[in-house]
């Protein structure tokens, strides 16, 4: 790591993580986890990997701040706010970090597919959430098609679905240029990345835990609401939003690996 280029890479990782904490996109633990994620990605893919990770992180951070006042109502529903902690960073970036490390060990193109697709899936889900909540029309649950309130896990809207497709496509296009991939790989990354968002939505509407507050009767992802413990009305307590994110990204990554192996 005495190479000046490597030192520059390490400084860049540290500065980006520190900036994320300073602008309140990351908690302190989230910044530390972002450093670790960045190091593993730099180990395998160098500045190319950091660029793709940065595209996800910067776009997600900007969208989370965009029209934040209109999203204030979601603070009472969602378990966590718009500052990512270490668990959220690992849930969204853990698979890509592992893929990068395995690429460093093996040099196999398989891990590049997993790396790009896992970031595409995370970006697709984030764009869907941040933009979809601004939809003027009430979203509908994906399975029952019943109308529900904005920000409900498992719900979809036309705006959110379009944002999810755009988020996956954005990372796919960057991947093609950054890693000099064939366009077929770009299509695969976009489709499977979008599929990861659909998996997240399905899990969010079925197994992800939701609580009913005994005081105000609000259905929320928060275990504690109005100062009291809520009653589970859907899913399982272990399956919070972070776990669902991790599982859906794992599914997308596994599918991309399977496609590469078969082809």
Image (spheres, helix red, strand yellow):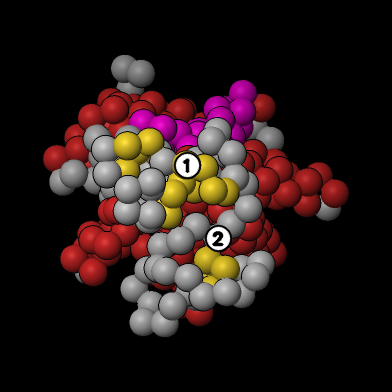
Q: Position of residue 49 (x, y in %)?
A: 45, 42
Q: Residue at x 27, y 44 (%)?
A: 226
Which is the main secondary structure of the residues drawn in magenta?
A: helix
Is residue 104 covered in magenta?
Answer: yes
Which quadrant holds residue 36?
Answer: top left
Please state which of residues 56 and 245 is positioned toward the viewer in this rendering: 245
Please state which of residues 199 and 21 is positioned toward the viewer in this rendering: 199
> 75 left or right of 88?
left
Q: Residue at x 57, y 49 (%)?
A: 234
- Write down the region rendered in magenta: 86-105
Decide if residue 133 is in sight here.
yes
Give the crowd class for mark 2: few <14, some 14-19, many >=20 residues within 10 Å: many
Decide if residue 58 is in sight here.
no
Q: Earlier in the sequence, mark 1 or mark 2?
A: 2
From the viewer's perspective, is residue 226 above or below residue 18? below
Q: Residue at x 38, y 77 (%)?
A: 135
Is residue 38 covered in magenta?
Answer: no
Q: Residue furthest left?
A: 22
As measured in the structure, the alpha-carbon distance from the residue carrying label 1 to the one carrying label 2 is 19 Å
Number of the label disc, if any, that sits on residue 4: none
Q: Position of residue 197 (x, y in %)?
A: 57, 58
Residue bearing mark 1: 231
Please state which of residues 213 and 89 is positioned toward the viewer in this rendering: 213
Residue bearing mark 2: 154
Q: Secondary structure at mark 1?
A: strand
> 11 left or right of 240?
left
Q: Secondary structure at mark 2?
A: loop
């Amino acid at each position: 790591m005495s190479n000046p280029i490597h030192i520059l890479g390490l400084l860049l990782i540290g500065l980006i993580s520190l900036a994320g904490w300073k602008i309140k996109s990351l908690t302190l633990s989230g910044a530390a986890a972002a450093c670790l994620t960045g190091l593993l990605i730099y180990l395998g893919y160098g500045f190319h990997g950091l660029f793709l990770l940065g595209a996800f992180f910067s776009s997600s951070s900007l969208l989370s701040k965009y029209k934040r006042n209109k999203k204030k109502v979601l603070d009472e529903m969602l378990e966590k706010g718009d500052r990512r902690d270490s668990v959220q960073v690992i849930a969204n970036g853990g698979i890509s970090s592992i893929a990068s490390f395995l690429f460093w060990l093996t040099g196999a193109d398989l891990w590049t597919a997993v790396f790009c697709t896992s970031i595409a899936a995370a970006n697709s889900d984030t764009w869907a959430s941040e933009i979809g909540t601004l939809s003027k029309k009430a979203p509908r649950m994906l399975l029952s098609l019943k109308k529900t309130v904005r920000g409900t896990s498992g719900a979809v809207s036309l705006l959110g679905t379009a944002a999810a497709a755009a988020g996956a496509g954005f990372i796919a296009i960057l991947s093609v240029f950054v890693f000099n991939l064939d366009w077929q790989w770009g299509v695969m990354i976009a489709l499977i990345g979008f599929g990861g968002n659909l998996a997240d939505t399905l899990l969010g509407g079925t197994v992800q835990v939701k609580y009913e507050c005994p005081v105000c009767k609000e259905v929320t992802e928060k275990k504690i609401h109005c100062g009291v413990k809520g009653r589970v009305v859907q899913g399982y307590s272990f399956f919070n939003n972070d776990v669902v994110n991790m599982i859906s990204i794992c599914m997308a990554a596994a599918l991309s690996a399977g496609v590469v192996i078969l082809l």
